Image (spheres, rainbow, N blue to C red):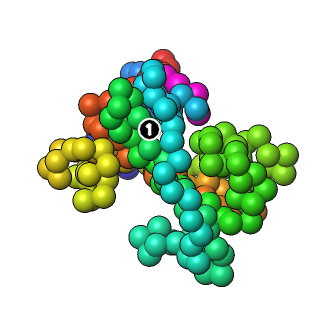
Amino acid sequence: MSILEREGLVHVQRGRGTYLRQEKVPTALGMNFDAGWNAVIDFAAGTKHVLQDSSNLAQLPNSLSGGVAADTSYRFLQFLNVQNGKFVMCTHVYLEQSIFNHACAKFEQWEPVSVLLQLSSGYLTRMEQSIRCSKPDNKISSVLMVSASEPVITVRRRLFDLENRLICIVLLYFKAELFRFETSFEFKN
């Protein structure tokens, strides 16, 4: 109860009890990227999405492997987004090889969430997304042409199938000045 009181959701009257606050409290939180799936990838006008690397992996890197089957092979795809001759975003995709084989050409041209939603088998049922601002590693720093001390936005997406298996991990890296994050709150009386 003390946590609810600190959060301002309830108030305590000594000797009388604990009551729900009648003031407005947030009931819904939304996030708006101001874009659809493809626009999130090609977020800047005039950006060209270019496949830089496509290779087989026997397993995921240790930093990404939590929650995946040990005997699963993956396809690694790296895309660079170019605007006015400069790289503005780098995308790393780790996709189960068996799913990649269903639509190789599409996965090598389009954002994987869009492709998975179009596949008739209903592969994609859930996605988790986290957004972080941090200093880039050497590879990302050199691709995006930023210093190691400049912040880079990392959007990490974990995609799940009908059986709640992790089938794909997408990492988007881009320059912090290109990122805009908006939230909206709705209050009830």
Mark 1: few, some, or many residues within 10 Å (few <14, many ≥20)? many
* Secondary structure of the residue carrying numbered label 1: strand
84 up-or-down from 87: above or below: above
- Residue at the spot 47% in from the left edge and 67% down from the top edge: 64
139 up-or-down from 146: above or below: below
- Which residue reaches farthest front? 85
Residue 81 in percent (x, y) is at 44, 38
Out of 53 and 7, give the one closest to the viewer. 53
Viewer can see residue 8: no
Q: Main secondary structure of the magenta part?
A: loop
Q: Is residue 94 left or right of residue 122?
A: left
- Residue at the spot 41% in from the left edge and 70% down from the top edge: 63
Residue 136 in percent (x, y) is at 26, 53
Check disc 1 and give the amino acid type.
Asn
Q: Is residue 147 left or right of residue 35?
A: left
Reading the image, the residue beneath label 1 is 81
Residue 14 in percent (x, y) is at 29, 41
- Residue at the spot 66% in from the left edge and 56% down from the top edge: 160
27 up-or-down from 162: above or below: above
- Residue at the spot 78% in from the left edge and 56% down from the top edge: 102
Out of 67 and 179, give the one closest to the viewer. 179
Out of 86 and 26, give the one closest to the viewer. 86
Residue 49 in percent (x, y) is at 51, 37
Look at the image and give the residue range highlighted in magenta.
32-37
Q: Does residue 95 show up magenta in the picture?
A: no
Q: Does residue 34 show up magenta in the picture?
A: yes
Viewer can see residue 77: yes
- Which residue reaches farthest top? 189
Q: Is residue 180 left or right of residue 78?
A: left
77 up-or-down from 90: above or below: below
